[in-house]
Amino acid sequence: MQSVFTRTQQPTETVREYVAQMRKLAKRIPDLDEKVLRSVVIRGLLPPIKAYVIQHGDNVITLEQVAEYGKNRRSCWSYVTYHSVLAGIFG
C-alpha cells in the first residue's frame, strides 16, 4: 500500500492528478499539516518539474499553486532542459 510519504509522481501523470492522489492519501493521516503535505508533494514531483516549482518557492504556498506551476509538464521539461543546456554551454 502506498503512503503519502512514499508516493511519487509517475511519468504519465499530470501534476494535478498527482496532487489529487496525494490529497486522498493524506486523508489517511489525521491532522496532517498542509505545509508538511506540500513539502512531501514537491519532494515527489518528477525532477524537472520539481526544479521548476522550487525555483518559484516563495510563490508556491498552497497545493493549488504547486499544481498551477506544474500544470504544463511539457513547458516545465522544456524550460529546465533549455536552461540546463545553456548552463552546460555557457556555465
Image: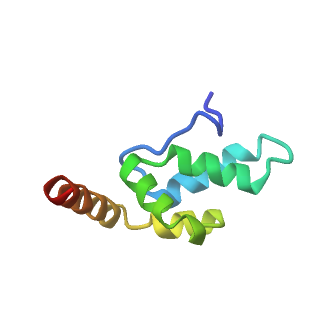
Which residue sits furthest front?
A: 91
Left or right of 63, for residue 48: left
Name the residue at 79% across, 41% down.
29
Q: How is the image coloured?
A: rainbow
Quadrant location of the C terminus? Answer: bottom left
Residue 34, image x and y in percent?
Answer: 75, 56
Residue 10, image x and y in percent?
Answer: 42, 43
Q: Looking at the rendering, which quadrant does residue 52 occupy?
A: bottom left
Name the residue at 18% across, 56% down.
85
Left or right of 37, for residue 68: left
Considering only vertical position in the picture, is 33 above or below 57?
Answer: above
Residue 38, image x and y in percent?
Answer: 65, 54
Pick whichever, 78 or 25, lies toward us.
78
Name the residue at 42% across, 51% down.
13
Pick whichever, 38 or 83, lies toward us.
83
Left or right of 37, for residue 59: left
Quadrant location of the N terminus? Answer: top right
Instruction: Give the mark count.
Output: 0
Considering only vertical position in the picture, is 59 above or below 36?
Answer: below
Q: Looking at the rendering, which quadrant does residue 30 occupy?
A: top right
Name the residue at 45% across, 53% down.
50
Which residue sits furthest top?
A: 1
Which residue sits furthest left?
A: 89
Residue 9, image x and y in percent?
Answer: 47, 45
